[in-house]
Amino acid sequence: MIKNILKKDGSTNKAALAWIGIVAVITFVAYMPSLQNGFVNWDDPLYVYENHNIRAFDLKWLLSAVVVGNWHPLTMLSFAVDYSIWGLNPFGYHLTNILLHAINTFLVGVLALRLLCFKDVAAPMVVFSAFVTAALFGLHPLHVESAVWVSERKDVLSALFFIMSIFFYLSYVSRPSWLFYSASLLSFVLALMSKPMAITLPAILLILDFYPLERLSGLNKGIKQVMAEKIPFLLLSSLSAIITLWAQGHAINSFESLPFMSRFYTAARALVFYLYKIIFPSTLAPYYPHPLEIKLLELEYIGAIVILCLITVLCLLKIRKMKFLTAAWLYYLITLSPVIGIVQVGAQAAADRYMYLPSLGLFLLAGAGAAQITRKMDRKMVFAAVYPAVCALAAVLVFLTVKQAAIWKDSITLWSHEIEYIGKVNKSKSVPLVIAYYNRAKAYDQIGDTGRAIEDYSRAISINPEFVNAYNNRGIAYGTIGDFENAIMDFDTALSLNPGDPEASHNRELARRAMERGVY
């Protein structure tokens, strides 16, 4: 039994942990090229290189600040620590991110072992299952955004404490102690203070009570105890929800702008979209735009609802014999629920980073499935076919992960990829395309390539002729090359669109004076 692996047989225990450790090391090595990446001009300025608040350990600011619509003081504290060590050298920030991801990979593998502690499973199957689970979690390219984008420190940090909370809860169930329970609760607090998406943990603990802990099949008294244990977690989740709604209130789309049925269809499509990306992790992008028009009778929406219904019905029909399938499916649905689009924040239809925690249940299921397949094979077949297949899959994932991480090298590379992606999947003009051209233009501006910056500002303006910031920035770029006439025209347009804009007014005055003197 796996209990023997973890507790009694020291050598086997070391061997199991060693295999998982190897996966964590491979994960770190796969992400090492990203240590050469810089910052990108998408949230990184607000979180790090233009955020003067992280340059001092201001506890009052850390506990009260809302950054990019989120209250996550622990994440901001981690940036303050990085700044105290590395200054504004992006190497250190990337190093912290990928170290956290590698640690999470190791913890995911150990979690797979721990969960199987509660089932009578053959030792070789358990080790193989944990190995596959950890490899999928660590090397899947869908996790690149969370691990490589500096601003997504909140993903890897929150996941660390989310998993630790589960660990302590499992210890509490095995050996009831207020120490373990309190540690689980504290870890949950730290997860919420890193990213509020951890809000679903109370429901996840109930899923674990259902399977593999089997704590919901006893007497009413036992069930009442299980539910009572979740009350402090639920109270913390409620508090986090209130804080999050307050912090993101201005960014939440109203039901007038996006009706409920449109949100429902979009959510169904997203759930299937993520499943597809888990299986076929190609054509990944930093920003997946909403369709300009949601046609409810289109195949992608109707098909998504049919697929979701079929999986759910299968889980219900097999709920007694295949509890692991039901538990994994519930975990996937619940952990994704905060970001699936029913409460819509922003204009994205989906995001790779949203799958960092939700993918865990599916990877556990895949690991268990792989181990189950090997159980029915003879030893020679396992060594001849299964192990080489797993190694080949890992190699493919490493290749895709390295390729995806390179997209985040800098702002120009990032937004060029986004422009290419939108051109493939959405030929029409869209808000994300405006954002991509505008941000790439700013990146060109930053490195002094004014000509290309002007071209991209012009493309953004051609898509959205009322984009005030693009006119203002293009006006500055024109002034840089001495084209004061066009600069003044852009500032005039910006002021006509936004009368009284102090920045455009100030820039126009500078351009006029420079035009008179012949300098800018």
Image: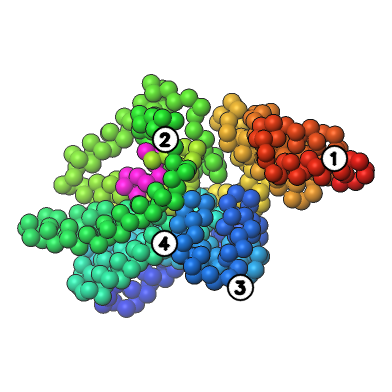
Separation of marks 1 and 3 at Cα, in angstroms: 44 Å
Instruction: Residue 358 in the image: state x and y as whole percent.
Output: 38, 50
N-terminal-most mark, 4 or 3: 3
Quick one: which residue is furthest to the front in this view? 500
Category of crowding for the residue at label 3, using alpha-carbon neighbours closer than 10 angstroms: few (below 14), some (14–19), many (at least 20): few
| Circle 2 residue | 254
- How far apart marks 2 and 3 lie (CA) works out to 42 Å
- Secondary structure under tag 2 reads loop
Q: Secondary structure at mark 4?
A: loop
Q: Amino acid at mark 2?
A: Ser
Q: Residue at x 45, y 57 (%)?
A: 71
Mark 4 vs mark 1: in front: 1
Q: Is residue 414 above or below residue 182?
A: above
Q: What residue is at 81 percent from the left and 39 percent from the top?
A: 478
Q: Amino acid at mark 4?
A: Met
Give yes or no for residue 274 being in the magenta stretch: no
CA separation, marks 4 and 3? Answer: 22 Å
What's the CA distance linking mark 2 and mark 4? 26 Å
The disc label shown at residue 512, or none: 1
In the picture of the structure, the residue carrying the numbered disc 3 is 85
Task: Tell which of 107 and 478 is nearer to you.
Answer: 478
User: What segment carries the magenta color?
Assistant: 332-342
Q: Which numbered disc, 2 or 4, marks the residue that appears first in the sequence?
A: 4
Q: Of the residues shown, which amino acid type is indicated by label 3?
A: Ile
| Mark 1 or mark 2, whichever is nearer to me | 1
Lateral position of residue 148 relative to residue 237, left or right: right
